[in-house]
Image (cartoon, helix red, strand yellow):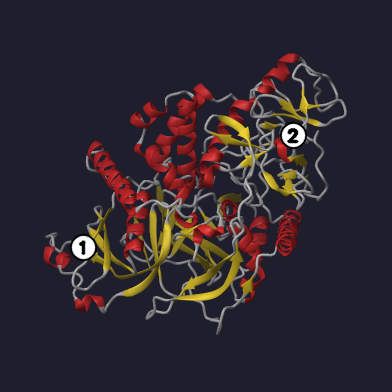
Amino acid sequence: MTQSNRFSLSLDKLDKLAEDVAKLDIARVAKSGNKVVPSFQREGYLEEANKKTLSWVKRFFVLRDSCLLSYDSPDVEKIVEPQTSVCLGKCKVQLLDSQEDLDKLVGGLIDCKGKSYCIHITTRPDKEHVLISCPTAEDRKAWVDAIKVARTVTHANMVKLSVENRVLAEDKGAAEVALMHSTSALAIFSNKEYIQKTPIAGGAEGWLKTVGFKRATDKKGKKMTQMLDGLFGQSELKKLKKRYCILRDSHLMLYDAGDALLKPRGVLYLVGTKVELLDDDETGTFRFRCTNPEVGDYIDFVASSEKRRRKWVFALKIGARVTYPDFRMLLEEHALLANVVMTPRASAPSAPNVPAIQVEAPPDPSIEDIDLQEHQLDPGTTQPYDGAGDPMLRNPEGKWVDVKGEEVLATTPRYSSSGEQLDSFNRPLPPGAVPMFTKDSTPIGVGPDGRHYLPDGTEVPKDGAHFDASGGELDKNSVTAATTVSQNLNVALKVHAFLAPGNEAAVDVLGRTFRGEAEGDNLVNADGNVVPLTSARRMGDHGMQAYNPAARPKAKESLKIVVENSSPDSEDVIELGCVEIDETTTLADVRTLIRKDMEALKFADFIFLFDMTPMLKYEEANHRALECMPELHVRGNELSFNTQPAGPGFSKKLAEFAKEAERKKQEEEEFTDIMSRVRAGTFLKPVARDYAE
């Protein structure tokens, strides 16, 4: 099997898994008394700050799973064009009460007098800002509680939680039993081939043709079988319009060509929706249909190829399982398994200045996977804060610094967003444990093998002297308590390896990932420490093993960077340029190589589409560019592309020294930007009344 398709699922396997999902849906509907669409998590009237009119607009809001939609009234059909659409996955939520805070947020452009119960939502990764006002404090609390739930119901969390549940079951020796008696979501989202094929964000997006939503019944409720059977005659084909379709979690949104991806022309809620392939007829089209049993409406789509049609049908059926009820069942499974397998964690300290954020998400390492800088966290770690609730950030060298940019001492107390005390490597401590150090205040950590190590990989005898941050020698009970960190770390490393394509994720003896190579036979870990290559480890089928990266051939390939043409009369793609890659080139490398050229082509902010699926930025380092051959699709914040180059817009050859220099420059720019926002007070600080990450 070639490199470009070794992770791909065959169409037969896709069909089989999709059929299994459909059967599970039928069984679930039967158990629930034919109630295929659950009640809304939350709905009601709210006021929203309109960016165009610079005024407050009263709208009817509907929150389902991870999607927040608004309409002019509650009487409109929920499939028609909403006024606003917000995807809440991993969003940040801040409560605003004072007039000063509101005026600062809107820059004085909108009159905020009398708006005492406001909620400010910042979406991720789009970074859209939504400001809504509730009529009472009770209403705001109810909406905030619902949003806290909604922000966790994502494809990424379904995958991570399913994988961790599977790993916990395997550690207990009950993997087969867990899969047989578990929720169907566990089997779907922990399927290894599916995970390695699909980026963690899940879903799909791309151009489809459709005539829009159709009624399956007439005004009297009688089924219109003739219209269903004869929908795609030659006359209907002439009415087909291109729509850019984005599947996010359990919602499918349709946009016009040229839209800025802010206001969909239509939206379909997938829970209980039947998705089916339609046989090709004399028109030679690649059709499929989505039927909503709640309102009796359906919509037919036409894909550009059989491969794309199968991809859409499969993705839509998976999206129908990214729901709060399924996620809740996975949480319950996790709680049962974690209580048996994982090590308890220390309770939150009582210091008044420690952050105390209430987020409805399980306290496990797989859910909180990125830090505030959008970088992937090391396995088993969490975003650290100091005792005042200010975030600690990584500088371009990987060192942790405070909000002033000064390097944080290893002995400085660290806390998670929920108030748990962390060790010097940002890992939650078990009960009875404290951060450990040598006599000269060098931090001591616990590796996945249960042994104790210094940051450079030097082993420290367990029965040797260990000290606390103030220099006092620790008793044996405290040292023993800290050693049990290895249990949680092993689970996190297994999840990390399961999610990493090729299962080749390397870590040092403390479980920290690597940033790159140093001089000689040394590597640089995520914290900027230089460690010998011989200390590298990887998680194999039988625990931690030595990591010996084999020399790979560096045959050069030319990868085209393309964007789909938004012209209504064309299916062609526009070639923006090409980049020379080899076996070691990741998508993160490609982004570094083409960043400046993309900005010149008015693509300052863009995402990669891996097999029609949007890829989160932190995932790009885990995917090799060769998997995307012969072309890699990109999308910006807008669908239209008006600056079509006469020829290739750029051509980049793989040059390691130039790539490394550009990467360092990019990291410095990103670090400078986030530090300026922290210092200016525009970065959300996790205080007790905020609900941020």
Report x, y in % for residue 96. Answer: 61, 52
Report x, y in % for residue 124. Answer: 56, 55
69 and 454: which is toward the camera:
454
Question: Which of the 4 image quadrants contains residue 300?
Answer: bottom left
Q: Residue furthest bottom?
A: 646
- Quarter in which the C terminus is drawn: top right
Q: Disc count in the image?
A: 2
Task: Return the disc, 1 or 2, that comes first in the chain's sequence.
Answer: 1
> Which residue is found at the position 46% from the left and 51% from the top?
6
Q: Label 1 belongs to which residue?
A: 279
Amino acid under disc 1: Asp
Amino acid under disc 2: Ser
Q: Label 2 belongs to which residue?
A: 424
Question: Which of the 4 image quadrants contains residue 303?
Answer: bottom left
Residue 535 drawn above or below residue 114: above
On residue 11, the disc is: none
Is residue 678 among the parts visible in the rendering? yes
Q: Residue furthest top?
A: 476
Question: Which of the 4 image quadrants contains residue 304?
Answer: bottom left
- Residue 122 in the figure: left or right of residue 386: left
How crowded pointer 1 is (Cα within 10 Å; few <14, some 14-19, many 20+) is rated as few
At numbered mark 2, what does the secondary structure look like: helix, strand or loop? loop
At numbered mark 1, what does the secondary structure look like: helix, strand or loop? loop
The CA distance from mark 1 to mark 2 is: 60 Å
